[in-house]
Amino acid sequence: MDTLSLVSHNMENKGMDEGGGIGLGTFFDPESVAVIGASNGPFNLGATICRTLREYSSFAGPVYAVNRKGESVHGCAGFVSVTDIPEDVDLAVIITPAVVVPSFVKQCGEKGVGHIIIESAGFDEEGERGRAMQREISETAREYGIRIMGPNCLGVLNTRNQFCCFYGVPEDGFEAFMSEPGTVSYIIQSGGVVAVVLESLMKDVVKANKVISIGNKSDVDESDLIEYLAGDDTTEVIGLYLENVQQGRKFLNAARSAGKPILVYKVGRTEEGTRAALSHTAGMANNDVLFEGVCRQAGVLRINAISELHSIPKMLTRMPLLRGRKIAVFTNSGAFGGITADLLVEAGLEMARLSPETRERLSATGQIFNASNPIDLGPALSMQTFLEIFDILLSSEDVDGLLPVPSLWHPMIIDAIAKLVKKCHQYRKPAAIYTPNAVYKTVSYREKYGVPLFESPEEAVRALQCSYRHYRSSSRKNSAGNGNSRYRGEKA
Amino acid sequence: MDTLSLVSHNMENKGMDEGGGIGLGTFFDPESVAVIGASNGPFNLGATICRTLREYSSFAGPVYAVNRKGESVHGCAGFVSVTDIPEDVDLAVIITPAVVVPSFVKQCGEKGVGHIIIESAGFDEEGERGRAMQREISETAREYGIRIMGPNCLGVLNTRNQFCCFYGVPEDGFEAFMSEPGTVSYIIQSGGVVAVVLESLMKDVVKANKVISIGNKSDVDESDLIEYLAGDDTTEVIGLYLENVQQGRKFLNAARSAGKPILVYKVGRTEEGTRAALSHTAGMANNDVLFEGVCRQAGVLRINAISELHSIPKMLTRMPLLRGRKIAVFTNSGAFGGITADLLVEAGLEMARLSPETRERLSATGQIFNASNPIDLGPALSMQTFLEIFDILLSSEDVDGLLPVPSLWHPMIIDAIAKLVKKCHQYRKPAAIYTPNAVYKTVSYREKYGVPLFESPEEAVRALQCSYRHYRSSSRKNSAGNGNSRYRGEKA
């Protein structure tokens, strides 16, 4: 098969994108997969991928193992060479010592494989010899028209079709995790961060859609993937962890036209951080000030804690956007009125000034300690009172969003919170809910009752801030793009 | 009994302090207690105090209940009036409607009770009528020589003798909590914050010594209690949550001479926060800039998250102080090198520059990916390698402290962490350990293995920063006080 016929072979399958080049779809939705380097040897990482696909998930397509002995691995038929596999191979996952990767990439080319995920490390991030091999791979890939993800990565996890080529997935809870597809997709330049995010999502109300570990980005980079996920109907929010951005303009364009909230944690805010990242995934030094400017221009939400990658999407998917700065706090635990007021103001939001009319309506419920903002419910304990307060606040023009801090001292209160979530959608105003508890209790309440609880008052306020920022930037983009009113940017 | 004989009665007991006034000891270590307002009525809060003292703790002294019917409550003998109690009463806890509190304070005076905790709300924090009652109580207390804690508070919890007069304690885990006395004491101007701190400590390696909820501070205030806890040999660290500080000079003096690390979260960093706190515990508006200056002068560690009240003491009690800025990061999860480098530099600390000699010694272990700081262990898996690395780093003059980020992918690694904790004491250099996990897993690892794990990289860096700040301010105080070398301030 010559190169041209290979390309046309690829153009026939779903790896083809609209622009006529070879798209990324096959990375996420392969019909058949070869795991190159999977064997039955001790501590073999490729074998864990075969096991995941055959035992922990219900991925439907055939999976082949390629190894020296041609032995089957966890029920995946074994071959000595990719070219020995009698059926078509859509996607190859290479997890062998670095030194043999280039020859396997060539084999894939000969076989007509259009998409390869290289998980092996030892390339650009490891000196001149590694760089030479990475160059060789890139040349072969160009020659055969192959798209490459990696090297030095985990590749792709897709809950929609239960495809996952991560090695060493956490066994505890992984099947449940894969069987609950969510709407948040991640692009992560580090296996360690992938692990923390997956583990955190296992006990959260938002779930993952696609998770991509991109490593050295020899071909496919964060901007390609933002573009791909922007066109993916099942992705509502995109979260990124980056160690470097090599093509700032490309990133700006991809992020600006995504039309979805994008959260980015980027290492290298300091010189020392940049230096440390260099040795990890082979990035180039970046100017962080420049990147900050790109984020502002593109309406990207820059985050400063890894934990925000899983915490903030709750606000962006489970609640309407915050369309103004005026926040009403209500609590049955007085201290948190002052604590949250400080945090809201420091975050550039405002304590809503309630009109005399609103205050009168609140007082008329007959159960309130303090009817000005922050509203202190005291030990009020009728569901009716809670619901009346929600209606009064959410319907008031004085209020754009809520920051409820209910102490869960009675089981009725968690039921009231569940009803509040519904009312937020009805009134199209968000609530960032924090229950004053130790973090392990908050996590267990959230999991048990399926309500979007934040783990600290700081996190709740930060979520409101991100929601408002996304509302503002998407409104601006819309009005710049088509001259429409800024309210068109709103997602209800 | 006249006032003079009452005072002399009080001077005979342990309530007496060295200065000749009536001290605070009886609040923490009463020989007998009367709970005024405890009855068998539905939802009676006083009854929960009787129950805690008789059923959930092993407090040794007699406890009496005072109520209209004179009925016994949870095994506590009942009386209609305090003066009916045939034995001496060391401490009275009043938890009745506000309007009858003044008369009970008078009864206590007649009975010769020298210390009263008033838990009832409805005083200075609630308008003119409340203020008048609080004034009346203060006058009576002065007349009889009574010390008052509160009103509008929970009072005292002391794990040393299992005395606790908090109403409505969490039943789940409370007995275990009380039976493990720790070395951190808290002064907290809010019941809600007390609840969060207690719950958090239940799953931490540091435990509470004394917890005091001070409410409206009509008599005993935070400065009196700092002074008391400074003289308490079993308290190593003092944590405060404050809504206001009415006597800045008194606070400065108490904090400056405490000789122990003091952590303070204060509401009112913004005008809105100050206003919100006003309605909660009846404070006066404070100038936050002034308070910030007081904290600096006194060497108080100001914190900005409630969660730091329980997280930072781990560093101050379980590790030697950090005596310089140079931090070595080591990890087996590459990304966290860059993440922590950014955070350390932003916190005013430094990435240690390792000398060629130190780097050579590290490389000689034969298991290291990257021997410059951050040190990347890769998947090294011999305990011997871990221990060698700890020794090399902790013994190096290039390094003042460690920030280890070990991914716990193998059971050996948690054993290595336990050994690291011991080595830190041996070398008198601290380590702030973060394992890259979801927070709920970190909490469970910490609890299961008893190692001081932090819940996020941000928290670990913050702990190092606080340790270094305390080292610096205590060194300064010592050299100012007695002309000794600044290294005298160190606690090993």
Image (spheres, coloured by chain):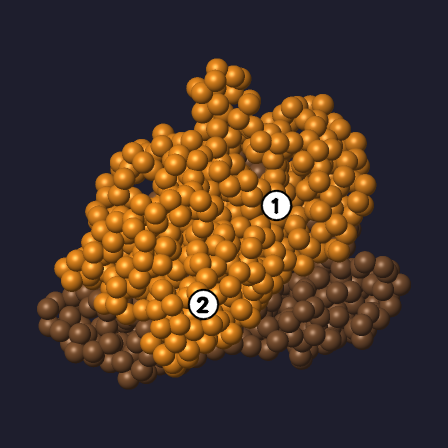
Chain colours: A brown, B orange
The quadrant of the picture occupied by the C terminus of chain B is: top right
Marked residue chain, label 2: B
**In the rendered image, which residue does mark 1 sit on?**
B433
For discs 1 and 2, the disc positioned in front in the rendered view: 2
| Number of the label disc, if any, that sits on residue B297 | none
Instruction: Residue A266 in the image: state x and y as whole percent.
Output: 48, 48
Instruction: Residue B482 in the image: state x and y as whole percent.
Output: 48, 18
Q: Front-most of B265 and B250?
A: B250
Task: Classify mark 2: helix, strand or loop.
Answer: strand
Identify which amino acid the numbered label 1 is placed on: Ile
- Distance Cα–Cα, label 1 vs label 2: 47 Å
Label 1: few (<14), some (14–19) or many (≥20) C-alpha neighbours in 10 Å: many
Dividing the picture into quadrants, the one containing residue A158 is bottom right
Q: Front-most of B307 and A344?
A: B307
Label 2: few (<14), some (14–19) or many (≥20) C-alpha neighbours in 10 Å: many
Identify which amino acid the numbered label 2 is placed on: Tyr
Which residue is painted at 74% across and 27% down in the image? B360
Q: Is residue A293 visible?
A: yes
Q: Is residue A320 visible?
A: no
Which residue is painted at 33% across and 76% down in the image? B68
Q: Residue furthest top?
A: B483
Task: Classify mark 1: helix, strand or loop.
Answer: strand
**In the rendered image, which residue does mark 2 sit on?**
B64
Which residue is painted at 46% across and 75% down in the image? B73
Dividing the picture into quadrants, the one containing residue A476 is bottom left
Instruction: Residue B306 in the image: state x and y as whole percent.
Output: 42, 53
